Amino acid sequence: MHVLLFDPGSDQEGIHSLELGGRTVVLLFEDPDDAERYAGLLEAQDFPVPCVEALDREELESFCAEAGYEARFVPAGFLPSSDEDRLLIAPPERNMDVTGWKEEQAAAGRPGAEEPEGGGGDPELEAFRRRLEGLL
């Protein structure tokens, strides 16, 4: 699976997520080209540029479950059938303000919708980050 990570390997490493209907959703792309395209669309919206990283699906799903997030699989060739599905192939036109997200993440220790999510103060996230680093 391919996910969008911000500052991989750093203390401010984060994973891209969406806020959909009160749920925090992490996108798991089957096709790396789809993930790259999504990252390019974020960049075009002046969002911090994520890196596309290939990681184990089971590890990602376990991380999401432990963190209370929903892992949403985006298969290769996915065609949306609803407005919510469209967000799986293209980010919303309007993102939350991420100015100073690194400092906010470190201070708050918690993620926000459509913001990079870091492992600032959450021990579970830190443990998962270390497990992910071991996979790379």
Image (cartoon, rainbow, N blue to C red):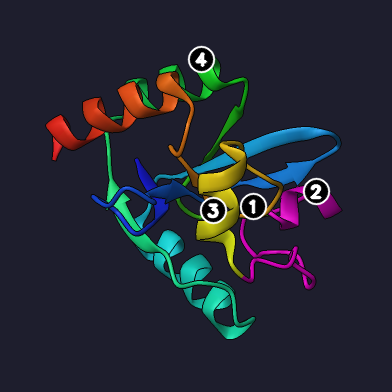
Disc nearest the viewer among 3 and 2: 3
| Residue nearest the observer in this picture, 78 or 134 | 134
**Tag shown at residue 116:** 3
**Type of amino acid under label 1:** Leu
Circles 4 and 3, Cβ within 8 Å, touching? The answer is no
Circles 3 and 2, Cβ within 8 Å, touching? The answer is no
Q: Position of residue 110 (x, y in %)?
A: 61, 36
Q: Which callout, 3 or 2, points at the residue further toward the start of the chain?
A: 2
Magenta residues, start to end: 80-99
**Tag shown at residue 66:** 4
Q: Which callout, 2 or 4, points at the residue further toward the start of the chain?
A: 4
Residue 42 falls in image quadrant: bottom right
Using the numbered discs, state the Cα–Cα distance from disc 4 to disc 3 in whole angstroms. 18 Å
| Residue 95 belongs to magenta span | yes
Using the numbered discs, state the Cα–Cα distance from disc 3 to disc 1 in whole angstroms. 16 Å
Residue count near mark 2 (Cα–Cα under 10 Å), binned few <14, some 14–19, many ≥20: few
Residue found 75% across the figure and 63% down from its top: 96
**Tag shown at residue 88:** 1
Give the vertical position of 97 relative to 30 (above or below): below
